[in-house]
Image (spheres, helix red, strand yellow):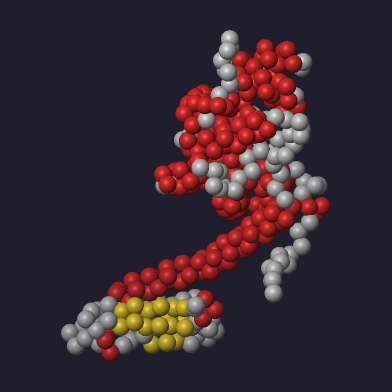
Amino acid sequence: MDCDRLLAALPRYLDDALDPAEREVVRRHLAECPSCRRRAVALEPSLALVAAPPIEAEAEEVERCVGAVISLIRQERLAGRLHRPRRRLFAAAAVLIVALAAGAVWQLGGGGPATTVPMGSTAMESPARPAPEVEVDMRGSGVRVYHLAIDDAPDTAVALVVNPALEL
Amino acid sequence: MAMRLRLVTAIREDDAGRTMDERELVRAARRGDEEAFAALVRRYSSGLHRTAARMLGDEAEAWDVVQMTFLKAWQRLDRYDSRWSVSTWLYRIATNLAIDLMRARTSRERAQLAGGEHHLRLVGDGEPASQAADESELERIMGRLLTHLTPQQRAAFVLREIEGLPSADVAEAIGCSPTTVRNHVFQARRVLRRELELHYPEYLPSTPGE
């Protein structure tokens, strides 16, 4: 594109009436021709920013960014790994609470030799209503069971089954 | 004594970046391939940073936006729509983050940026040395005046006029129609001219006949 044609095309550029290919030709010409650029800016000052030479980040800055992004991703993955099993454990605890309220016996897993942990507590042993007996199968899992008794609410008991590897 | 933390995993552009196209890199990253994702970061971080810096008027803040853009992209890899180029997808995430940041700014922060106290390279050094000093000064002033635009106008102007993205890509990045992009650009030009008249009338082009 010669300079005269560029100046003739400028009003259509400003009206956004050029097709993409023509538009690109105008932008490239403005970037490469100081004389046309000056005349274009005299017509529309904001064209001082159009097709400005690109700034490239330093290689060091880019590498720093890559390192930071990969660190963020690894933190994210670690957090995901920590949260998923915990959610399952909280769900298991919730099931246990329901089981306690119903006075049922709930077994985690089945079959094989089982080590059982009695879950009765003094807080649950109300004279009016005997505490339900609960047994949890701990078969070789290495998990810890925490039992929370609430004095003011003897009918309620909470048991937490926790994998020690996830305890913080 | 200065200490540096270095990423232990070796990630080389040759391994993934040059032999795979961007959609292949996304597919590999979806399978958990960090090297493929690092190649995407290496390929697009410079352009995204330049764009975010021009929108925000702050280079350091722009790097934060770039990092958050890639973290969000990693989290949403399964939602990438392959009808669009990866760069358009990344521009969309970065533009939304930059717009949120601009909206969160107080008026005082905006005034500081408009005052030009910040460090920002708005344009590169590729202009011929013979270029008139007035012209590069006008570029700097226009850069400061960009802070007077609304976040949407600014995003549209930077993506369409400075970066030269196609209208449809800008519309996708901002989340509006191409007609709205056009209106944002027209409004942006109007505001820039008005601010130039108010604060820097000496840089206004002479009217025909003068």
Image location of residue A73, percent across then percent down: 61, 59
Q: In the rendered image, is residue B31 in sight?
A: no
Image location of residue B122, percent across then percent down: 63, 40
| Farthest residue, direction bottom | A122
Residue A60, compared with residue B6, is above or below; it is above
Q: In the rendered image, is residue B114 in sight?
A: yes
User: Is B181 left, or right, of B12 in this rendering?
Assistant: left
Out of B121 and A9, give the one closest to the viewer: B121
Residue A149, compared with residue B151, is above or below; it is below
Quadrant (top left, top right, bottom left, bottom right) of the N terminus of chain A? top right
Residue B73, compared with residue A161, is above or below; it is above
| Farthest residue, direction top | B209
Residue drawn at (74%, 64%) of the image: B9
User: Is B26 left, or right, of B157 in this rendering?
Assistant: right
| Farthest residue, direction left | A128
Residue drawn at (52%, 26%) of the image: B201
Residue drawn at (48%, 87%) of the image: A115
Image location of residue A127, percent across then percent down: 19, 88
Residue B159, compared with residue B23, is above or below; it is above
Out of B94 and B121, give the one closest to the viewer: B121
Out of B92 and A91, give the one closest to the viewer: B92
Out of B55 and A85, give the one closest to the viewer: B55
